Amino acid sequence: MKNNTETSTQTFASIPMQAVGPFKLIGDVETDNLMVPMATYETPLWPSVARGARVAAHSGGIRVTVIDERMTRSILLQAPHAGIAAKHLASLQNRQDEMQDVVSQSSRFAKLIDTHFQVVGNLIYLRLEFHTGDASGHNMATNAADKLIPWILENYSDLEYVSISANYCTDKKVSAVNGILGRGKYVVCECTIPEKFCKRFLKTTPQALVDLHIKKDLIGSIVSGGLRSANAHVANMLLGFYLATGQDAANIVEGSQAINHAEVTPEGDLYFSTTLPNMIVGTVGNGKGLDFVLENLELLGCNDRNAEPGANARRLACIAGATAFCGELSLLAAQTNPGELMQAHIKLERAQHS
Amino acid sequence: MKNNTETSTQTFASIPMQAVGPFKLIGDVETDNLMVPMATYETPLWPSVARGARVAAHSGGIRVTVIDERMTRSILLQAPHAGIAAKHLASLQNRQDEMQDVVSQSSRFAKLIDTHFQVVGNLIYLRLEFHTGDASGHNMATNAADKLIPWILENYSDLEYVSISANYCTDKKVSAVNGILGRGKYVVCECTIPEKFCKRFLKTTPQALVDLHIKKDLIGSIVSGGLRSANAHVANMLLGFYLATGQDAANIVEGSQAINHAEVTPEGDLYFSTTLPNMIVGTVGNGKGLDFVLENLELLGCNDRNAEPGANARRLACIAGATAFCGELSLLAAQTNPGELMQAHIKLERAQHS
Amino acid sequence: MKNNTETSTQTFASIPMQAVGPFKLIGDVETDNLMVPMATYETPLWPSVARGARVAAHSGGIRVTVIDERMTRSILLQAPHAGIAAKHLASLQNRQDEMQDVVSQSSRFAKLIDTHFQVVGNLIYLRLEFHTGDASGHNMATNAADKLIPWILENYSDLEYVSISANYCTDKKVSAVNGILGRGKYVVCECTIPEKFCKRFLKTTPQALVDLHIKKDLIGSIVSGGLRSANAHVANMLLGFYLATGQDAANIVEGSQAINHAEVTPEGDLYFSTTLPNMIVGTVGNGKGLDFVLENLELLGCNDRNAEPGANARRLACIAGATAFCGELSLLAAQTNPGELMQAHIKLERAQHS
Amino acid sequence: MKNNTETSTQTFASIPMQAVGPFKLIGDVETDNLMVPMATYETPLWPSVARGARVAAHSGGIRVTVIDERMTRSILLQAPHAGIAAKHLASLQNRQDEMQDVVSQSSRFAKLIDTHFQVVGNLIYLRLEFHTGDASGHNMATNAADKLIPWILENYSDLEYVSISANYCTDKKVSAVNGILGRGKYVVCECTIPEKFCKRFLKTTPQALVDLHIKKDLIGSIVSGGLRSANAHVANMLLGFYLATGQDAANIVEGSQAINHAEVTPEGDLYFSTTLPNMIVGTVGNGKGLDFVLENLELLGCNDRNAEPGANARRLACIAGATAFCGELSLLAAQTNPGELMQAHIKLERAQHS
């Protein structure tokens, strides 16, 4: 690698990648025999996710549902005092159409769908929320905000600019706001796995897995001082999927705030779900032009030029969620058996290095 | 890319990488003219970090301090009731030497340095804390836990196994416990930047930057419902650094929980700091055997075979922290100026694509 | 006190109470020379709050602004799967008028103003948000929910009842949702205090107080793993005020999640503010019929029978917020001076006991 | 009530109070037929807690276990840079005996048992942790800190004073630190309730209650963005108990961060527990000198002059925890039955007002 400050030649970090599966999805995406690429240094992840995919496919597939989608940017303005802040915010609520006109100048895909705010003293944290088509939308939202700020300052001349981004967005940082108000795709992945498949594929029982889920994902996360997070290792699957599909993988920070829910059904089977309330993905934008990324998006069916705007990204989100689901299911199953986790690591790593 | 389930050939995701700098560090690492590799799809990050490095080098360098280091695994056991849990935990407190004997069988580097626990009803979340030499230590800690569990169950026969990992560790998930009890390296990065360098390199003033920091990093994070997090985009720098140095980048989830602190000094200069209380890095283990990773560790001076165990990893942690510091300083400076952020993105991305 | 199980005679706990002030308020409440009652065992609180009130009155008064008001109850329903949950939630969004008709049967004051939801697997957490006139509204919201549930179950027959209250409300528990989506009154209290009054009344400087605020309220709360909380002791003032005015004081849990913001103005004065985004108060309901409570509500001008519904409660909220503001200002000032806090406690408690 | 600023005569707020029970406790407190006083405006709480006490007494009593106890104060110091902070903190670790000598001058009960710290840039948040006998210990800890600060500044002359209290304590504010490092008493309350008693006394089944607990206390709290909190209304019980026993009830803020854990036993019975990891109580200090308080402490057996220091307070903590346990059990049971909650409120309030 070259090391010059100004003229440094770009090289590449080569991260091990493999397609795993096959996945079967139902619900908002209907597909079968889908192979999902993941790039990671933690290669024991591949067979673990594949195991989850396999048992889910035998059980009828993973049901994926998109609950919501939006991208946000929070600007920060300052008023003479909170009374004026409140007055202007009330006014802005009634001018969303005018604001959309301004937004339209920045992009034909950006649609202002909602705003939320916080007032702290005389400070206004205004969270602008957009539909951004197939882009994850960070830049589109920033660009729209960049157009809206001068318009707001012109229309409300006693407000002052503080920042174009004020952490109430919030981007690549832990928060509760992204889950509660939404940022990225809100995806739920579910599957009911017959008891016999639990035993055959996962070497565990529905009851053992639910019991571990409650004590680890739920209570364990609560005692750790977690925040809107109840899972085992969703970050791992998102990282692998994001690197393979050209996503900005720093978004795994918020993506990691996923919530598993599992129960034993009246029939004695395992209902398992992974909910990702604020997962950021896109099929256009930075990183998407690289050859291997395009190839992977193609493989996943997320590069359909005839699809309506946003459809490719929603499909990608569902597959990302399903990948997380499989990794969760498989690791939790492993952890119900003393020693299995460590043995699996040792075996897989030996296999790799031999 | 091949797509077979079982026999899938491994390929590679090629992430754009560049070395940026030069960095000057003082304190626990003394170095100058260090170039730091970062791999990312978000390539505007490179010049942004380089700008931060440049102004800090002109200002005497970034002071790096390692406050603490440890790796953890929390096992989960169940007692007949909390009274028995309390009794056995008190007993275990006095048997750390015996526990270390058990740990020693799992690795010659793992040293049990402390334990903490939570009791919830009859459940015991026991957090085992280790020194792990130059490894980030996830597997070393898991392996040690795998040895300790049978020993505990044998010595306290009324305890039952629930899980080898119970989210009180906590790994790759948002938490407060990692910052409060420690996990990974605790690194502080500081620099006092003369007002004139603020203006020359960062196009801003100490007062403007401090003001933005307070309203965005501190108050903005608080209103977003953040958790032990007060920064702009530490996750971006850690991701780029982690991918370039063979780290498990899913650890940016907890690494992102970093805290900036800035003030205007009595002399009118800018004191700026980024504190990363729980940042995970290692110089040996998964991912470190790849050629480009070895080359990068070499470049950073973190592959010194004569160094005492742990020294390479501590050096790597300091450089990672300094990289985060530079990105924070540079982005906050940019956001003090209306429009600069968007213009920079547009300009850099055009430059790349032309 | 009598101790029989079933027939135990009710007695009274007598909590020391004093009216402190005088307060001057401007903005959404305009009043002067207002004395505010507080009941507490921690009697050093009285002179501390009085000092804050005094300096604020000299500085032109505390500006109070009501940003929002609502009371909530989150019901919990279960769908066959998330796809059906999403479909029914979309349908409910369009039937808010019908839902209001149902709500109207439960109370003439309850108005359904918004709904929000979370879907976790197949679970629906539906947060019903109401205006509730002068009542804090817990029972009104519960009662409305009690009417809405059968209507929902009838209209969406594949949904099942799980609970009338599911912690997404959230009542008397720490959360981020109450600050982000609102619960109770959202009140901002502000005042700019001339430097000379800072020195005369508070024995400190604007710079010293702002510095302490940043390091204690902001950074200190962040490192403690706080959640949407940045103050010194708002809970103390709310407790005293709530007990004196017949409020359900368990609501100080969420009320304590208040955020101070302070800066030195260009003129060298102190801008200080306390924002209480989710503070629960009412002027009718449980506790309000006691003689001393009625007397106190009267004293505060919050028992005006000619006021429009909700006006008395909003006024009460502003006064509660101003009381918190004064206690914050006064304690922070005290803590800028080494030893003052302890000396004040000792002196006041001696005075009491002598 | 008199309203003069300076000379205002103190009056009393009379809060309705009743003793409920009878309670049976086993484990760290062994007692039977104990009546527990609670003062509250929310009087439906009394029969609800009594119901929980009754079913627990029939089931063998509530097992109470004290896991830990301490009171804390975090002082804030500033170093020239983090390197010096680290050096001095390492030195202080080895001088705990000398520090205890200083502490001894402030009180014969205060014992320094541990310290923890956070370094943020050049700031040191030093958390001093004490045993404080039968006092809740706020003032004792503050007083000890007041003595320690000059000693530290003298011994480490390049450190500067910032504040005697810096929110890393943390007092009366939401945090994760209090649960993780401890503050107040750490109490676990447990009982296994036979299925038949669940039905007879609680009108529900073990399975229904556990199911609701998981979906409301655990998942509901997680989606609300809760922090180390998993209960229904612990704040209510603590408030009532605190007011009746002369406690500083603002401490319910942190006390509310309690965690329920429930499961169906292999025998089909209900294991139910409430864990209060950081609950603050004392039997001496402010508020304890009032006649009705003394009478209540006497009633509870917490005014034993022959007990060793701390024993009265630990007993009080166990009873407080048991009271919270009973309220939790009873409300959760009620919420498993549609309509029961509202009907109970209506019935009880009518009964009161008639």
Image (cartoon, coloured by chain):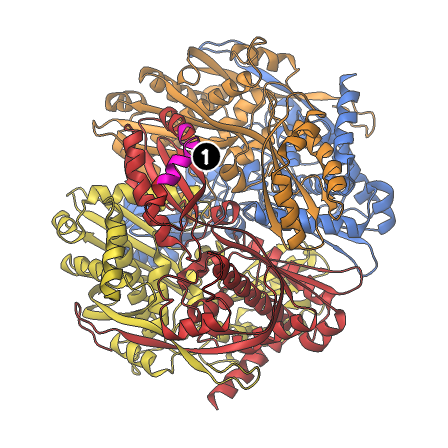
Chain colours: A orange, B blue, C red, D yellow
Choose between C315 and D193: the one closer to the eye: C315
Q: Chain of mark 1?
A: A
Q: How many marks?
A: 1
> In the orientation shown, which residue stands out farthest toward the front?
C306
Task: Indicate left or right for A65 with D106 as reference.
Answer: left
> In the orientation shown, which residue stands out farthest toward the bottom?
C354
**Residue C72 x/y as whole percent:** 42, 47
Amino acid type at image mark 1:
Ala
**Residue D96 x/y as whole percent:** 53, 69
Task: Tell me the magenta residue range.
Answer: C91-101
**Residue lying at 60% horizontally and 15% vertically, measured from the top left:** A293
Helix, strand or loop for the magenta stretch, by majority: helix
**Residue lying at 11% horizontally and 49% vertically, measured from the top left:** D196
Task: Indicate left or right for A51 with D210 as reference.
Answer: right
Q: In this rendering, is residue A16 above or below C285?
A: above
**Residue B282 x/y as whole percent:** 58, 37
Q: In this rendering, is residue B218 above or below B266?
A: above
Q: Is residue B159 visible?
A: no
